Image: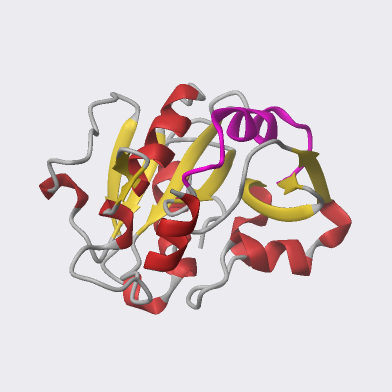
């Protein structure tokens, strides 16, 4: 799907960021979506956006689906680096959202991406930068020995990502452990999936 599809010349091995923020968040109790829930003074997703913007990527692809992120005034999306990518097939799982971001990144000429999740507000800017700057075709952050996003993926590996299902970058870590490099990172890779998670980490 991605082979020989570039519409722009490769950008000197520079890496774009992808934030996956398309899911329904069905495990989160209440009327609000978990990404819009207030966490330490601002929405969960805003923490992720701010941390990625501070990492100074030229392009950040924010993949939406269940939420039309442009409609929510609580979110600040003013950075010129941010492009919202709508995944109309978000119900097919996280893999479809990652592929939506990769499609745009490939079109824009990127040879690699660093992907993370919109519900991980305590992954700091330095983790995004360290993973992105590391050598290797497949690089993951390691928090206290646990492999967690963000993950950098070289374009050579993009065709191996599933079309659907809830495994995106994680499937590559399992399929190609021979290529995997890890970068020890500070921070907390907790996912805010439930209201209990929100209360615990707030």
Position of residue 109 measured from the top left corner of the image (x, y, whole percent): 48, 35
Q: Nearer the viewer, residue 160 or 71?
A: 71
Position of residue 177 measured from the top left corner of the image (x, y, whole percent): 84, 61
Position of residue 157 measured from the top left corner of the image (x, y, whole percent): 67, 55
Would you say residue 151 is visible in this rendering? yes
Left or right: residue 129 versus residue 89 is right
User: In this picture, is 182 found above or below 52?
Assistant: below
Q: What residue lies at 52% left-to-right and 49% top-to-bottom?
A: 116
Q: What residue lies at 60% left-to-right and 56% top-to-bottom?
A: 158
Residue 138 falls inside the magenta stretch: yes
Q: Nearer the viewer, residue 142 or 7?
A: 142
Q: How is the image coloured?
A: secondary structure
Left or right: residue 77 versus residue 104 is left
Q: What residue lies at 32% left-to-right and 33% top-to-bottom?
A: 82
Q: What residue lies at 60% left-to-right and 23% top-to-bottom?
A: 12
Q: Residue furthest right?
A: 178
Left or right: residue 191 versus residue 92 is right
Q: Nearer the viewer, residue 47 or 171?
A: 47
Q: Nearer the viewer, residue 115 or 7?
A: 115
Residue 46 falls inside the magenta stretch: no
User: In this picture, is 37 found above or below 14?
Assistant: below
Position of residue 162 measured from the top left corner of the image (x, y, whole percent): 56, 72
User: In this picture, is 136 found above or below 160?
Assistant: above
- The stretch in magenta equals 121-140
Q: How many marks?
A: 0
Q: Quadrant of residue 195?
A: bottom left
Would you say residue 99 is visible in this rendering? no
């Amino acid at each position: 799907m991605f082979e020989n599809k570039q519409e722009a010349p490769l950008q000197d091995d520079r890496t774009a960021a992808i934030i996956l923020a398309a899911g329904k968040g069905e495990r989160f109790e209440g009327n609000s979506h978990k990404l819009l829930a207030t966490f330490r003074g601002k929405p969960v997703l805003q923490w992720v956006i701010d941390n990625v913007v501070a990492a100074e990527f030229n392009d950040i692809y924010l993949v939406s689906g269940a939420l039309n992120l442009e409609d929510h005034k609580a979110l600040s999306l003013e950075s010129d680096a941010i492009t919202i990518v709508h995944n109309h097939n978000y119900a097919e799982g996280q893999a479809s959202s990652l592929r939506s971001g990769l499609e745009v990144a490939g079109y824009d000429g990127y040879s690699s991406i660093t992907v993370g999740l919109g519900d991980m507000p305590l992954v700091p800017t330095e983790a995004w930068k360290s993973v992105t700057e590391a050598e290797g075709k497949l690089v993951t952050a390691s928090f206290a020995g646990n492999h967690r996003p963000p993950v950098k993926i070289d374009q050579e590996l993009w065709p191996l990502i599933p079309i659907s299902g809830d495994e995106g970058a994680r499937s590559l870590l399992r399929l190609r452990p021979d290529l995997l490099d890890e970068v020890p990172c500070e921070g907390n890779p907790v996912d805010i999936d439930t209201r209990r998670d929100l209360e615990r980490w707030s």
